[in-house]
Amino acid sequence: MKGGEPLDKQILGIGMISALAVSFIAVLLISTNVFGPIAEKQVQEMKAKEWIPVPLADAVDGDGNTGFITGYIYPHEADPGTAYASNLSTGTAYEYSNDLNTSMTGETPYDTTFDLVVKMCINDSHAYNTSDSSWELGWVNATATCADLSIGADTAMTEVSIGNGTYMFVHYYLNNGGAGYQISHGETYNVTNYEFWAYH
């Protein structure tokens, strides 16, 4: 043929362009079907995180479990952020217990202000950020209920880190907005619910 490519070369060129176009479309379809669901699944997993209650063991001091160590009825602290950032002594508490569901040891004086304090051990499955090797206090919290002291259902407790290493130790407290709690002569009270929560 004059003035152009031979016919067999033209057919070869059209065939190659067609094959490239078909390959490109196939790659698009495969990537949409394979990578699309993966990306969608990752978004769903991120949205699925929520606050969930963690079942608690009693008196877990460094045994590897997240759990309740000690509950205190403690003399009211004017600066709880400082006072509760260190280990508390049962000897200076009005009452204390190493178990969640039991009567406390000691006696709270009437007409004297006090705070409710709970010491917790938290393991790395609940509050350790592996991406930057740090403990995250914001990934955990605790709530309590005590109608006898006008503490509403599942009231959020304030948290103060005591320290961390293999585990994180935290005090959770309620102090009646800084005023402390009081009981009258002969009055009894019962914390009817205490829950520890982790963000997963």
Image (tube, grey):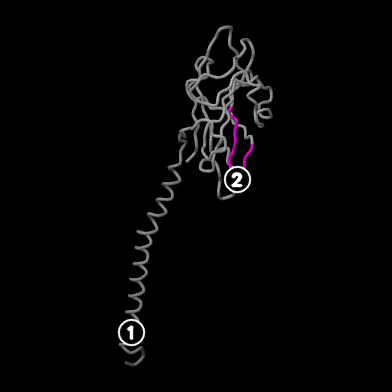
Q: Is residue 73 above or below residue 53?
A: above
Quick one: label 2, few (<14), some, or many (20+) residues within 10 Å? few
Residue at image position (53%, 12%) is 188
Q: Is residue 37 above or below residue 81?
A: below
Q: Is residue 6 magenta?
A: no
| Kind of residue indicated by mark 1 | Gln
Along the viewing direction, whichever of 42 and 91 lies nearer the viewer:
91
Q: Which residues are magenta?
A: 163-172
Q: Going from the N terminus, do you reach mark 1 or mark 2 first? A: 1
Q: CA distance from mark 1 to mark 2?
A: 65 Å
- Residue 118, percent from left and from top: 57, 27
Along the viewing direction, whichever of 169 and 41 lies nearer the viewer:
169
- Residue 71, percent from left and from top: 56, 25
Q: What residue sits right under mark 2 in the picture?
A: 134
Quarter residue 14 falls in: bottom left
- Residue 187, percent from left and from top: 55, 9
What secondary structure is found at the residue carrying circle 2? strand
| Kind of residue indicated by mark 2 | Ser
What secondary structure is found at the residue carrying circle 1? helix
Residue at image position (58%, 30%) is 119
Residue at image position (49%, 32%) is 57
- Residue 182, percent from left and from top: 60, 13
Mark 1 or mark 2: which is in front?
A: 2
Q: What residue sits right under mark 1 in the picture?
A: 10
Residue at image position (59%, 39%) is 168
The tag on residue 29 is: none
Task: Pick out the residue farthest to the bottom.
Answer: 2
